[in-house]
Image (tube, rainbow, N blue to C red):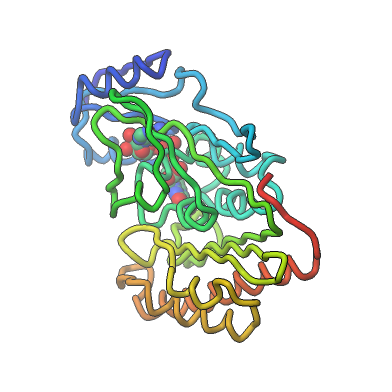
Amino acid sequence: MSFEYHEPTTLSEAIDLLARYGKTARLLAGGTDLMVLVSRNKVDLAHLISLDSVPGLSGIRQDERGNLVLGSMTTHREIETSPLMAGAGSALPQACRTVGGVQVRNLGTIGGNLCNASPAADTAPVLLAIDADVTLQGPEGSRNLPLNQFLLGPRKTALGPGEILTSITIPRFSNPTATLFLKAGRRKAMEISLCSVAARLTLGEDGTADVRVGLGSVAPKAIRAVRAESVLQGQVPTLELIREAGATAATECTPISDVRGSAEYRQMLVESLVTRALSLCLDQLRNKGQATRVS
Ligand SMILES: Cc1cc2nc3c(=O)[nH]c(=O)nc-3n(C[C@H](O)[C@H](O)[C@H](O)COP(=O)(O)OP(=O)(O)OC[C@H]3O[C@@H](n4cnc5c(N)ncnc54)[C@H](O)[C@@H]3O)c2cc1C
């Protein structure tokens, strides 16, 4: 396959190139998804636009409100090793740590993971569970979207013509919060998930719960298990309610059977992993008795 390689040095130049070449162009971040497709001739490509020399797209910072802002070119390895990701954001480094091997994590970016829009993308369930927003910049300017409105289906996102994902924002939680990511595969490393679960539990001053549950690999895109969340939402969490939330999550996912596992097995995994993730979050909060915060 032959294509023209572009290395813009500003965001507006990258947007112009993307808008000019339309569907014949692809953005290149770490290339760990895209170059596999290119090498297999599975993508129609005339223009490859690298984001490598565009300033301001990498790194993790705290904004003036205490939210965490992750540049779309931030690698899994940077997230995995950043001290800023301790506390309630810790499910994200947990997820990044399970992506491929170290070589893949040194190149692969969080933006590429989301824009590739695989139902098995490991960061997506976590970012849904911690209410992340994405920022897109394109020929018409900038816009923010909650992640569940960005992910539309397998390989489909809300990116419009000429738009680039520039950052992901994780809100600061003011009450004690715990998060956890669990992933099941056929082996323990270098594995695309059979099922992944992210849980976020925030306890109010009266002990009642604000809950999110994100699921990966068990629907056409990463989803929130909203009926499972509502079992616990506003309640003082107990193990009985947590078990009920786990069982409910299994009824609202829509897994397929494939070479990696049957739909029935994936539903069993959802029930067990959601129950385990929420129980561990509750343990973390009760045992520590103190706020674990994103920031
Ligand atoms: C051996 C191996 C193991 C892997 N294991 C896992 C795993 O366990 N879990 C997992 O989730 N993934 C896994 N992956 C997939 C991949 O590493 C991740 O999805 C990674 O985060 C992709 O990021 P990237 O920067 O390499 O994206 P790229 O390949 O550069 O891009 C992916 C897609 O997103 C688009 N894109 C990238 N950045 C932007 C942006 N800022 N704005 C708009 N569009 C953009 C590109 O045009 C392309 O279509 C694995 C890959 C390999 C090769």
Q: In this view, does 93 lie to the left or right of 151?
A: right
In the figure, residue 85 lies in which quadrant? top right
* Ligand number 1: quarter of image: top left
Quadrant, the N terminus: top left
Residue at point 61%, 55% (across, down): 91
Q: Is residue 162 left or right of residue 202?
A: left
Residue at point 63%, 44% (across, down): 80
Which residue reaches farthest front? Answer: 206
Judge by depth and name the residue closer to the eye, 127 or 7.
Answer: 127
Q: Is residue 158 left or right of residue 226?
A: left
The picture places residue 277, in percent across and down from the top left corner, at 60, 69
Quadrant, the C terminus: top right
Q: Can residue 96 be seen in this view?
A: yes
Q: Can residue 31 be seen in this view?
A: no
Judge by depth and name the residue closer to the eye, 238 or 21.
Answer: 238
Residue at point 39%, 58% (across, down): 222
The picture places residue 227, in percent across and down from the top left corner, at 43, 74
Task: Decide: is 194 above or below 12.
Answer: below
